[in-house]
Amino acid sequence: MERIGFIGLGIMGKPMAQNLLKAGYPLTVYNRSDGPIKELVDAGAAAAASPQAVAANADVVVTIVTDTPDVQQVLLGENGVIHTVAPDAVVIDMSTISPTATREIASVIQEKGASMLDAPVSGGEGGAIAGTLSIMVGGEEAVFNQCLPIFETLGKNIVHVGQSGAGQLTKLCNQIAVAVTNLAMSEALVFGAKAGLDLKKMQYAIQGGAAGSWQLSNLAPRVLERDFAPGFMVKLQQKDLRLVLQEADRLKLSLPATSLVHHLFHALESQGAGDEGTQALVRVLEQLAGVEVKQTG
């Protein structure tokens, strides 16, 4: 089995790395903080002192970090993967970052004789833990096929969507649909609360029909319990929406609903809620409506 180097052991990365380890892959890990490294080492992984050291002992390097500058740093920075990546190695970036930056990074990696796939994921922490993520992959199809067993360890819905950058563009489409559906769910809950409905019964009644969505089935119950712990943080959703709107600006494209959700999340951030789950969007609408969404009785 390929030796895998894994960089980034956050909410998503740590369970993904654990799943690779459970599948039997030899694993070397790096993270900015030591706690997650210790957990993986205790489970059988090796630790590396830098991204450069990770790449020196890997056939495939997987990165999943926060934002575009973070990916650029771990791959191309002073102690980056680029300095030791093997000519026949593959770099798989599973972060959500700029499609333009992705193509630029891929070009530099290709100059070293290695290959790069952009493979952002959807499914949140639960999907990362269960190994059921949706993975959208850009890059050469032959390289995708080579890495398919790795992807199958991490997810269930795995699609090669095109050449370099196409994975990131597809993820931005995903984030548009996720964010706007989250707003629709929130408005439905606030409307139901204001009208005096039994919200749990309302949710059950509509989620099995045309209104059904992942958000309605998975996030609405958490809202009713006033549980705003993150599966995916507001501040990370905002980072993704900024990427969407930057790309839309480049395309001279108007996205009014996405822009509205972005502004509503700004209101949450201004209240110090950037680390809460994205279901906290409902709280902005609650403030506008003068009502609280919760299950009673």
Image (cartoon, rainbow, N blue to C red):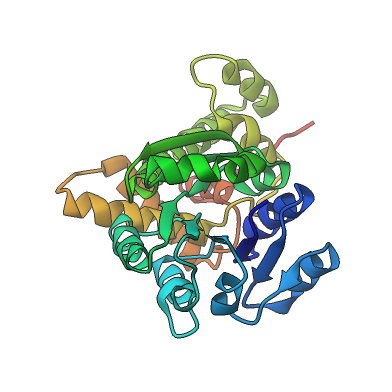
Q: Is residue 218 left or right of residue 139?
A: right
Residue 14, image x, y percentages? 69, 59
Is 24 or 38 nearer to us in this picture?
24
Residue that sits furthest to the left in the current view = 252
Q: Is residue 67 above or below residue 257?
A: below
Q: Is residue 162 left or right of residue 42?
A: left
Query: For residue 44, which quarter of the picture?
Result: bottom right
Is 260 or 6 nearer to us in this picture?
6
Residue 101, image x, y percentages? 31, 63
Identity of the residue drawn at 44% across and 65% down: 87
Image quadrant in which the C terminus is located: top right
Query: For residue 176, which quarter of the picture?
Result: top left
Is 37 or 272 nearer to us in this picture?
37
Residue that sits furthest to the right in the current view = 42
Identity of the residue drawn at 38% across and 37% down: 161
Residue 72, image x, y percentages? 40, 72
Residue 45, image x, y percentages? 76, 65
How many numbered marks appear? 0
Identity of the residue drawn at 40% across and 40% down: 141
Visible residue check, residue 2: yes
Q: Is residue 289 above or below residue 296?
A: below
Visible residue check, residue 265: no
